[in-house]
Image: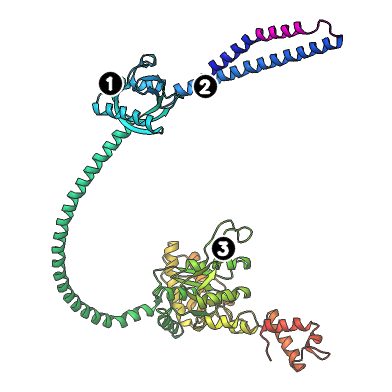
Amino acid sequence: MDINKDNSQLTAVGELRPHAEEQVRAKLDKQPPHRTKAETQRLLHELEVYQLELEMQNAELHRARAELEISLARYAGLYDFAPVGYFTFDAQGRIREANLTGANLLGIERRLLLHQPFSAFIPAADDKKRFHHHLKIALQRRGIERCKIHFSGKDGTIICGQLQSGAVVTPNNEDDYILTSIVDGTVQAQLETKLRDAHEQMEAKIQKRTTELTLANARLTTEIDEHKRTEAALHEAIAEIKQLSNRLQEENIVLQQEVTREYNFSEIIGQSDAISYVFSQVEQVAPQDATVLLLGETGSGKGLVARALHNRSARKERPMITVNCTALPANLVESELFGREKGAFTGAHARQMGRFELANGGTIFLDEIGEMPLELQCKLLRVIQDGEFERLGSPHTIKVNTRIIAASNRNLEEEVCAGRFREDLFYRLSVFPISIPPLRQRTDDIPLLVSHFVSKYNKRFSKKITTVPKEALDTLQQYHWPGNVRELENIIERAVITSQGSTLQVLDRFDSFRKPEKAQELKPLGAMEREHILRILQKTGWRIEGPKGAALILGLNPSTLRGRMRKYGIRR
C-alpha cells in the first residue's frame, strides 16, 4: 500500500514538470526582451541550481522506493511463514486475506480462501454462533478479544483453535475489518483432557486406598491391644530374669576383674604392685569425663594407658584422636589442633577440620604436651575451660565436647618454674595425674612381657620359639632399661628374628646390660639463665634499676630484665 502511494507521487511529479516549464517560458516572454549579460548569467545559474535540486530529489525518491520494496518483501516473508495463522475478516466473517500458515491449518490453497466465509469450516452450530459473536464484540469494543472454537482442518481433522482478534477502523466506518490470529491448541486440549482423566483416576485410587487403610488400622488396633497384654506378661518375666542376672553379675564381677587384671589390661602387660596401682587408677577415672595427665618416661606405655582410659569410658563408641606434639612443626601445631579456613595462610588451599573438632564427642590424646609452644597453651586452656575455639582465618566460635588426656615425659612442675609451661594450664591438666612406672621399677613384669612379645613375633615371623632361657631373663631383669617397655620389645623382636630353633637367643652384648654411672646433671640454657638472674637479684636485694641494680650488672635494660623475670616466673 505504501509503495503504490510512492509510485503515484512519482507520477504526479513527472506530470507537473511540463506545466512548470510552460509557466517559466511564459514569464520569460513577459519579461523585457533586453537583459543585460549579468542578468542572463544569473538566471542561467539559478536554472542550473534548480535542475540539480530536482535531480537530487528524484534520486532520493528512487532510493526510498527501493527501501520500501525491500521492507515489503521482508514483511511478506514474516507474515507468510509465521508459526501462527493470520486471517483478515470482514464484518460478516468472510476471509479477505490469510497467510500460508493459516491456509495450511485449513488445508486449502490461499487463493481459494479469499471471500470464503470462515464459518463454512466450522462444523458445530454452537461454534459458528460463538465465532460470529466474537467478531461482533471485536468490532464493538475496539479491543483485543479471545475465544476458542473447533474447526475442520487439513484431512478433515478437528482443530481446537485459540482465536485472538482486533478490529481495524476505517475513517467512515464503511470498510472496517478484523485481524485475527489462530493458534492450534489441539495438543494442549488433549493434554488437559488426559490430565483431568488422570486426576479422576487418582482420586478413585486414593478413595480405595483410604478404605483399605481404615480396615488395616482397625486390625492393627486389635493387634496392639493383644501386644500390650503380651508385653505385660513379658515385663513380669523380664523382672524375674533381671533379678537372676543381677545376682550372677554380682557373683562374676570380682572374677572378671581378676581375670582382666592378672596379666593383660588393654594390652598393658603386668602383675606387679606398681602397674596394678595404675590399673586401679584407670578403673576409677575412666568412666568419668575428668581430664587425665599421664606422666612417665618415654616408652613406658603412656599411649596404652590412654587407650585403656578411652575404651573404658562412655565415649568408647566415638574416636580417640592422638596428637603427637613433638611430631608437628611449630608453625602448623595451631592449624592441626584447631583447623583452618581456606586462605588462612600461604599454602592453605582448602578448608581443614582440626583435631579437636574431629574428636568431638570422643577423646583427644595430647602426647608430649610439654613440647607445645607457649603461645598456643593459652588457646588450649580456653578449650579445656570453655570447650570452644576458632579456626585459623575464621571469626566463628566452635563448641566441642571432648575429653582431654595429656601425657608428658618431662617434669611439668620444673617446666612451670622455668617459664616454659603455663602454671594455670598445668593445674587444669593435672586434675587426675597418673604416674606410669618405668620398667626398672617393675622388673617382676619382664617375664610376662617377654612371653607376650615372643608370642606376638612368633605369629608375625612364622617362628616356633617356646623356650626362654633363665639366664637371659635374669640378664634382662638386671638392665636399667632407659627405653622402658619399647626398648624391651625391640630387643625381643630382634632376638626372635635371629633365633634358630625353639629357644630364644638374645644376641645383644651382655656387658652393655649394666647400669650406667650417674652422669653430671645437665641443665637447659633457660634454666641456667633463670638461676643466674635469680642469684644476681638476691645479691642486689631485688633492686632492678640504679647504679647498684641487677640490670646494670647483667648488662640489660631494666624493662628487658623485667620481661625475663615474667618469662621465667621469678618473683620476690
Residue 323 locus on image (x, y percent): 53, 69
Q: Bounds of the magenta span?
A: 18-36
* Of marks 1 and 2, the one in the foreground: 2
Mark 3: secondary structure:
loop
On residue 74, the disc is 2
Is residue 31 found inside the magenta-colored segment of the image? yes
Q: Nearer the viewer, residue 10 or 71?
A: 10
Q: CA distance from mark 2 to mark 3?
A: 65 Å
Residue type at tag 2: Arg
What is the chief secondary structure element of the magenta stretch? Answer: helix
Marks 1 and 2 in Cβ contact (< 8 Å): no
Residue type at tag 3: Arg
Q: CA distance from mark 1 to mark 2?
A: 33 Å
* Of marks 1 and 3, the one in the foreground: 1
Residue type at tag 1: Gly
Name the quadrant containing residue 544.
bottom right
Q: Nearer the viewer, residue 162 or 200?
A: 162
Q: Which residue is mark 3?
A: 340
On residue 156, the disc is 1
Mark 1: secondary structure:
helix
* Of marks 2 and 3, the one in the foreground: 2
Residue 72 locus on image (x, y percent): 52, 20
Is residue 404 found inside the magenta-colored segment of the image? no
Identify which residue is drawn at 69% across, 14% down. 54
